[in-house]
Amino acid sequence: MKKLFTFFLFTLSLTVFSQAPNGYYNAAVGKNDSTLRAAFQAIITNGATDIGYDGLLTAYAKTDLNSSGKIWDMYSNCTFNFGTQQCGNYSIECDCYNREHTSPQSWFNSAAPMVSDLFNVYPTDGKVNGERNNYPYGEVGTASYTSGNGSKLGTSSFADYTGIVFEPVDEYKGDFARAYFYMATRYAGLCEKWASGANVMYSYANLGLTTYSVNLFLKWSRQDPVSAKEILRNNAVYGIQNNRNPFVDNPGLEEYIWGNKKNATFSLTVINTPYLASPSNRATIDFGRVGFQQTDTASVVIKGVNLTGDLTLALTGTNASAFSLPVTTISQANATAGYKLIINFSALGMGLQTAQLTVSGGGITATQVTLNATSADMFTALTATNITNHSFIANWSSSANATGYTLNVYSFTGNGSNAPKILLEQDFLSGIPAGWTTSGYVGTTDLASNLRLSSGANFGKVTTPALDLSSRISVLSVKAKAWPNDAAAKLCALADADTLATWLTGADYQTYTVNIPLKTSTSTISLYAFAGSGHRVYVDYVKVATQGVAQTAESVSRYPRSVGNVLNYAVTNLQSDSTYYYKVTPEGNTTTVSDQIAVRTLKTNTDVNNVQNDPVIWSSNAYGIRIQHLPQDCTIILLDLMGKQLQSVQHVCSELNLKLQEQGIYLIQVIQNQKFKIYKVKL
């Protein structure tokens, strides 16, 4: 399965706004010192849009996703799923992200537009944000708190201030310095008057900044020049807020207002520093779960800007040998245009496999991307093949370290002579039904008339209202499929607190069934999907119905049996037009028995509702119904026994396969030249 590693709007915005529009900064040319600051204030204030405090959370999808599609946090090493991991409550790092004001909103009483200015407010880890509180930035001597990426809180060691400060890591110090230069320019005349606390950083003394903050931020901006992250974010913010940070567009502009060029006049500069627009440094490419001894691929777009030469690729790290690249060099031309790199993974070991992809050369700062893949024993029985009237071939996947496999083939006795009663039936056309409860992540907007269970670090669970399961054995039917790229995601069914079944979902919808033992008159059924990458599931339909007589599994003669270290086995000597089931158990390891596969042997039927000499025939199999000898250019309509149309196929030639999810009696209407015949078929 190929996984596309997207690089989101950062790269898109680069192609639309690679720099400030022509003439954007012309009014500032030839000025310096206070007149230069005033000119830039007018430029970045005129036409600027206030998106509102709530608008920040939406904007982050365009301004602050890294090239692996995660929230880009400068306070921690945590990764967050946009939208689903917003704070909320937090207790430790990586719980969630929230809105961090680089100039705390308490300094300006949460007033607009400062409170929602994207150049002032970034998404950051909730726990670290809370530790930073409203302390000013600075350099820490002795730390009282250190985050996962090395950001620190503690007593200032920088001249002119001795209080508590928060120090970001070196990689982002220039980013925050340029945020303060922007604020002191955009809000000139206001920031000097902000409330107590702000006076550590803002004042009338130095064109909006204190001596302490001027010296601190000039040092940080010189040590950490404008990065690709800032350029791309500046472009994205401009598309939303309609203004730019001139200190990102014009590296060194701060020197003309507060630094060593105050006596020089400003002239426009062009950013020609080589950088990598995609992927971003410290991004992660996650292959998800890959079956043992299976292979998979992921792709990432390598795109450089202002390159001076070719790019070089290298793999290092603990499991580097499990990953491979088709090339180790990308030409300057291809990288500038955007090169789609395919990364290969072979699951030769078990558990988490990790390596690092390093992109270097072409004048860029080396960029490192983490590669993760989890090799799992995704053992499962597979759909039967070669189904005939009296036989089929049972199939299954490989199980790690298995020495052989035991196959059990069986059927169920007991036909349910009492009429079944539907206790619950739900198709989720209107979202989560009344009376149902949820916990974790249960989404209703991804796919029409489906519930999505699980997202990122959140499990997903949905529970029915109380049902009377005390008098008769019942059957649970669930139609579900895996979220794209999460093939083999597990879906658990529970009756009260007891697990009924765990199903491995696939890319296409399947209907899963399980018997429900006698419970209580107020029992509930729950569907549960695990947390983490690779576990997301869509649920399309749920039905609970009583059955007449409890069915008992009865093994076919000679089964179960050990069939050796093979991945398929021919099952023979079966009855025609009969339903069988099989399960497989690996030998020599701790893997449990597989899921259950149903198979129906074939029966050709030429006499049900057919007139004499009618050539049309049909046969049933595990997939549905096969219709043969159809008249040319006919229309086929499939109906249920109540006459409800289920499928319609036009311009059929001579043969048609109809895929059906459930067993039952169906009506097939064959229409040609305004004449029709109806056939009743049983699956």
Image: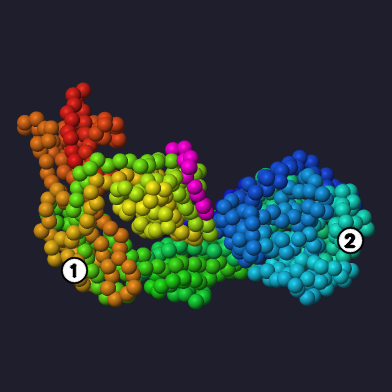
Residue found at x 12% / y 60%: 572
The nearer-to-camera label among 2 and 1 is 1
Q: Nearer the viewer, residue 61 or 464?
A: 464
Main secondary structure type of the part rendered in magenta: loop
In the image, is residue 422 above or below residue 154? above
Q: Is residue 623 left or right of residue 162?
A: left
Residue at the location (32% across, 54% down)? 517
Name the residue type under label 1: Arg
Q: How many marks?
A: 2
Q: Which residues are magenta?
A: 429-442
Q: Is residue 329 left or right of residue 553?
A: right
Question: Which quadrant: the C terminus?
Answer: top left
Query: Could you tell me which quadrant the N terminus lies in?
Result: bottom left
Q: Relative to 558, does residue 438 appear above or below in the rendering?
A: above
Q: Amino acid at mark 2?
A: Thr
Which residue has dot 2 on it? Answer: 210
Is residue 439 a member of the stretch shown in magenta?
yes
Q: Which residue is mark 1?
A: 561
- The type of colouring in the image is rainbow
The quarter holding residue 332 reads: bottom right
**Within the magenta stretch, is there residue 273?**
no
Q: Residues within 10 Å of mark 2 (few under 14, many from 20)?
A: many
SS class, disc 2: loop
Asked if one can make out residue 497 in the rendered structure from this viewpoint, the answer is yes
Instruction: Give residue 383's position: percent from left, percent from top.
Output: 26, 56
* Percent x, y of residue 141: 79, 75
Q: Identify the mark nearer the N-term, 2 or 1.
A: 2
In this view, the residue in front, 71 or 448, is: 448
Distance of label 2 from label 1 (alpha carbons):
83 Å
What's the residue at 15%, 60% (across, down)?
Answer: 556
Q: Is residue 405 left or right of residue 523?
A: left
